[in-house]
Amino acid sequence: MYRGMVGGERLTPEEGFRFYIQMTDLISAQEMGFRLQAEGLAFDDFIERIRRNNLAYFRFERVRRW
């Protein structure tokens, strides 16, 4: 994740795949949280924690470019 987020060099295919999986998991967690909240099954603090987590990741330029 470090090389994917802040590294300057190209990722190996294996690293790129791991980075892709981690990022899609991050987005999927937020989507699932919104869905659960809409159905009244998630607490606001849970949604806020996911939102803050995503904001922390997306502070990095390489994550935003992904």
Image (cartoon, grey):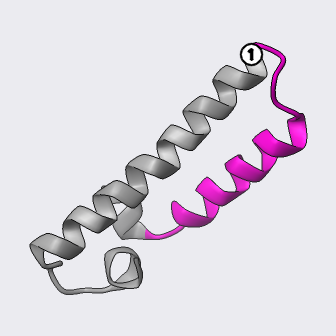
Where is the N terminus found, in terms of image quarters? bottom left
Q: Which residue is mark 1?
A: 38
**In the rendered image, which quarter is residue 17 located in?**
bottom left
Q: In the rendering, at what x and y percent does residue 21 appear?
A: 34, 56
Q: Residue at x 69, y 49 (%)?
A: 50
Q: In the rendering, at what x and y percent does residue 2 appear?
A: 41, 83
Please identify the residue farthest to the left as the structure is shown.
13
Question: In front: 33, or 62?
Answer: 33
Q: Circle 1: is it few (<14), some (14-19), or many (20+) Cα within 10 Å?
A: few
Where is the C terminus found, in terms of image quarters? bottom left
Say whether residue 45 is magenta. yes
On screen, residue 23 versus residue 66, left or right, reads right
Q: Residue at x 66, y 59 (%)?
A: 53
Q: Residue at x 21, y 68 (%)?
A: 16
Q: Could you say whether the residue bearing mark 1 is in a helix, strand or loop?
A: helix
Give the amino acid type for the residue marked by disc 1 in the picture: Ala
Q: Residue at x 69, y 48 (%)?
A: 51
Residue range corresponding to the magenta coloring? 39-60
